Image (cartoon, rainbow, N blue to C red):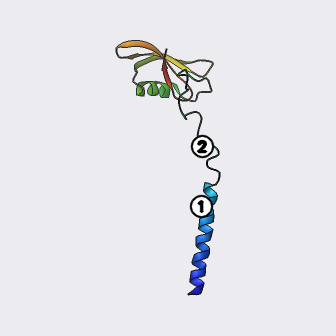
Amino acid sequence: MRLFIGATLAAALVCGGAASAQTAGTTANPDAGQNAAVKKPDATGLPSKGANSFTKAQAAKRMEKAGYASVTGLAKDKDGLWHGSATKDGKTVDVSLDFKGNVNAQ
């Protein structure tokens, strides 16, 4: 019985130590491990330049998901931004998609 209690106590200490080691230092950088490409929109509201991995079809789908319809003329510029034309609320507007997935009307 003493051996069982001793083994249980030892296992509890090992597990407790492992749990505290996992949480140590987690407040130093709350954004650690997050992908900056999809983290959050640019605070300025402007598209962010950067290497864009969206395909033409994915860019159109993102724009449609943001409320734009009839997306046409999509082309990627030297800054990695997809530009095209679309309709929203009955008006034709120029739209862009940055590498973070943010859709912006111009």
- Please give the name of the residue rendered at 61% of the width and 60% of the height, measured from the top-left corner: 20
In the picture, the disc for residue 19 is: 1
Residue 69 position, x and y percent, is 38, 20
Q: In which quarter of the image is residue 68?
A: top left
In-front residue for pair 2/84? 2
- Please give the name of the residue rendered at 44% of the width and 27% of the height, measured from the top-left corner: 61
- In this rendering, the answer to whether 105 lies above or below 17 is above
Residue 13 position, x and y percent, is 61, 70
Secondary element at image label 1:
helix
At label 2, which amino acid type do we have?
A: Pro
Residue 103 position, x and y percent, is 49, 23
Return the disc, 1 or 2, that comes first in the chain's sequence: 1
Q: Quadrant of residue 15?
A: bottom right
Q: How crowded is mark 1: few (under 14 residues within 10 Å), some or many (20 or more)?
A: few
The residue under label 2 is: 30
At label 1, which amino acid type do we have?
A: Ala
